[in-house]
């Protein structure tokens, strides 16, 4: 099972993106500046947008899900109940899994962005996709919400998970790091070695690496453990 | 056509002409052939085709029930062509400028602003529809005719919610009603000719109904 990006390009006016690489089973993190093309790349990996040139091959992948940054983009039901049913879920169970305090008859679009995001992610993680692409899964969530998403990502039974994010503090156990630099997708490698190459690393990771203490992982626990090893 | 006043006036006159009689509809169609960039002025060809098919369906039902479906189809097609031209030629601020010029800084400004907001929603509709299609496809619900109604319900609810948000935003920014706008209009000779021909089409439609 893998996703192969072969000389993939996309462009718009003065902006352009090139991507080459292979996404294998595991958790991949893709970082990049605002407007660098992360969402465009997410769409292409998920097969919802065709590249201008090159090919995206999804090998042995039978089910794909792209979770958009804005949860409203996924809403197809008027009420929370209809929305849960549209995912094939029993509403009360889905609401409980999302950890939100609403009744099933509540209009879906009247939920706050954070509540809707939690409900949407609960629906997404209720299924087992071969390829799960998450575009800014942590946006609109508070710290407990982000930690819950990390647990859900780490709890996936297998498959390829690609996370596109600006998150700086709370990460699941990432296996591979990629970043978009100067209009190109660059593979930094596998954690922890990738942390030495990662230009968009969060300040804490940069500081630890600068101090010569390479975290084994970038989960909160991994970073805490590395910080405890740092002298001074 | 640069001058929004003439453009909107032409659309209004031609729509009435087409609605009044078949002769008016033919005149409106001829006007569309002469004064617009014709097929190039159609931005959303699929949406236009879908609307046309809807008219064909209604016309077929009318023919079936013994009324003049062909007349209905001809007149509605002419109105559709004029409507798509106005939509494609519109620029942000056109309705606001024309409304304020026509009905003043209070009612005109507000009517213009409402029209601008409606155009904004209309322009976002095709994107919203695409998103709902993608969302349904991702949930394993194939897109089809039966899915249009639920999608429409969501779009309407979303538009109402957006209108609420906009109203709150305007109130928070201190908007109490009305406003001034100092637009300079510079009608060109061909535009004046187009306006005169649209008026003639209406007169023609009125006398030949």
Image (cartoon, grey):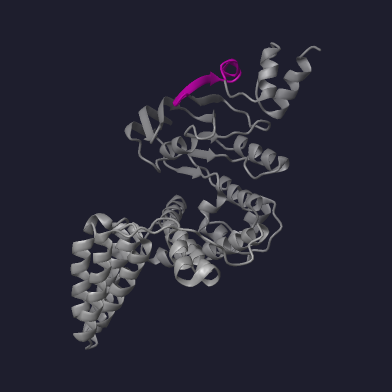
- Whether residue A59 is visible here, answered yes or no, is no
Compared with A226, B175 (above or below) is below
Relative to A231, B22 lies left or right = left
- Camera-nearest residue between A191 and A9: A9
Residue sitting at x 51%, y 60% = B181
Residue sitting at x 55%, y 48% = A70
Q: Which residues are magenta?
A: A182-198
Residue sitting at x 22%, y 75% = B201
- Residue A108: % across, % down: 59, 60
- Camera-nearest residue between B108 and A168: B108
Relative to A210, B137 lies left or right = left
- Whether residue A147 is visible here, answered yes or no, is yes
* The image quarter in which residue B202 lies: bottom left
- Residue B209: % across, % down: 21, 86
- Residue B151: % across, % down: 45, 62
Residue A191 belongs to the span the image colors magenta: yes
* The image quarter in which residue B44 lies: bottom left
């Amino acid at each position: 099972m893998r996703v192969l990006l072969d000389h993939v390009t996309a462009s718009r006016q003065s902006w352009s993106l090139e991507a080459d690489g292979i996404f294998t089973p595991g958790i991949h993190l893709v970082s990049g500046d605002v407007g660098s093309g992360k969402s465009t790349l997410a769409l292409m990996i998920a097969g919802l947008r065709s590249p201008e040139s090159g090919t995206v091959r999804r090998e042995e992948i039978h089910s794909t899900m792209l979770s958009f940054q804005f949860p409203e983009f996924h809403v197809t039901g008027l009420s929370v109940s209809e929305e849960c049913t549209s995912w094939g879920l029993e509403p009360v169970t889905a609401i409980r899994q999302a950890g939100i305090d609403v009744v099933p008859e509540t209009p879906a679009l009247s939920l706050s962005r954070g509540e809707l995001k939690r409900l949407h992610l609960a629906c997404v993680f209720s299924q087992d996709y071969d390829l799960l692409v998450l575009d800014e899964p942590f946006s609109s969530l508070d710290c407990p919400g982000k930690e819950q998403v990390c647990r859900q990502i780490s709890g996936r039974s297998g498959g390829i998970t690609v996370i596109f994010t600006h998150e700086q503090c709370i990460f699941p156990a990432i296996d591979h790091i990629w970043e978009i630099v100067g209009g190109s997708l660059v593979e930094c490698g596998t954690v922890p070695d990738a942390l030495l190459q990662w230009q968009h690393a969060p300040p804490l990771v940069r500081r630890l690496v600068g101090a010569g203490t390479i975290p084994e992982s970038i989960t909160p626990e991994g970073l805490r453990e590395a910080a405890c090893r740092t002298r001074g | 056509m640069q001058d929004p006043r003439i453009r909107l006036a032409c659309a209004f006159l031609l729509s009435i002409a087409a609605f009044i009689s078949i002769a008016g509809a033919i005149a409106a169609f001829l006007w569309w052939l002469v004064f617009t960039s014709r097929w190039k002025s159609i931005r959303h060809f699929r949406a236009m085709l879908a609307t046309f098919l809807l008219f064909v369906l209604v016309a077929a039902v009318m023919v079936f029930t013994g009324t003049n479906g062909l007349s209905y189809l001809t007149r509605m097609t002419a109105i559709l062509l004029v409507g798509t031209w106005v939509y494609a030629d519109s620029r942000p601020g056109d309705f606001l400028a024309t409304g304020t010029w026509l009905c003043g800084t209070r009612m005109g400004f507000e009517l213009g602003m409402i029209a601008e907001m409606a155009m904004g929603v209309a322009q976002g509709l095709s994107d919203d529809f695409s998103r709902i299609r993608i969302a349904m496809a991702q949930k394993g619900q194939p897109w089809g005719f039966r899915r249009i109604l639920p999608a429409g319900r969501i779009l309407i609810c979303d538009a109402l919610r957006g209108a609420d948000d906009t109203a709150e935003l305007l109130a928070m920014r201190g908007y109490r009603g009305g406003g001034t706008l100092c637009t300079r209009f510079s009608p060109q000779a061909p535009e004046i000719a187009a306006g005169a021909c649209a008026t003639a089409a209406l007169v023609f439609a009125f006398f030949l109904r």
